Amino acid sequence: MIILRNLILATAISAGSALLLPQNAKAFELSGAWATSVDQCTKVFTRKGRANKVDFTNFPGVYGGGFIAEADRLRGKFESCKIKLRKENGQTINLIAACANGIMLSNVQFFLKVIDDNTISRDFPGMEGMEVKYHRCQI
């Protein structure tokens, strides 16, 4: 009898705790090519190779630049970062990434604010009013 009562209690607790979990909590989909201006996407990014993979044009910085986000990486024209930690809080994404630019390695913290599905801004803590907006490119 005690075993049956404990089993019923355990079932009720696990069912009740499932109701407390957020049902529609999902991570923002950051993957894709992001440029500082949607009008400049084709000047910053191109598709290359047999796999038709998104890559940078020869001089993307002239047109504002951007980055490519993949599952666990962020890539710029001259650097590559491996995302070590990702934390989301509402519309804010906090990333810590190990970045290499061919000369040195460093940990970089990215504070991103989701504006909509295709627009984010990067904030720079300690630099009041400093932010860069990025727009998702449909390449």
Image (spheres, rainbow, N blue to C red):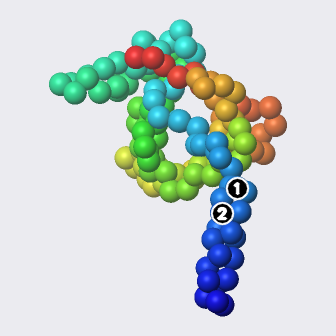
Helix, strand or loop status at disc 2: helix
Residue 15, labelled with which disc? 2
Q: Which x, y percent locates residue 27?
A: 58, 43
* Kind of residue at badge 2: Ala
39 left or right of 47?
right
Q: Residues within 10 Å of mark 1 (few under 14, many from 20)?
A: few
Residue 10 lies, with reference to residue 102, above or below; the image says below
Q: Nearer the viewer, residue 49 or 88?
A: 88
Residue 4 lies, with reference to residue 113, above or below; the image says below
Circles 1 and 2: CB distance less than 8 Å?
A: yes
Q: Which residue is at a point 37% across and 46% down the rendered structure image?
A: 102
Q: Nearer the viewer, residue 65 or 34?
A: 34
Q: Which x, y percent locates residue 117?
A: 60, 26
* Kind of residue at badge 1: Leu
**Looking at the image, which residue sits at the far top?**
39
Residue 49 lies, with reference to residue 87, above or below; the image says above
Which residue is labeled 1 in the image? 19
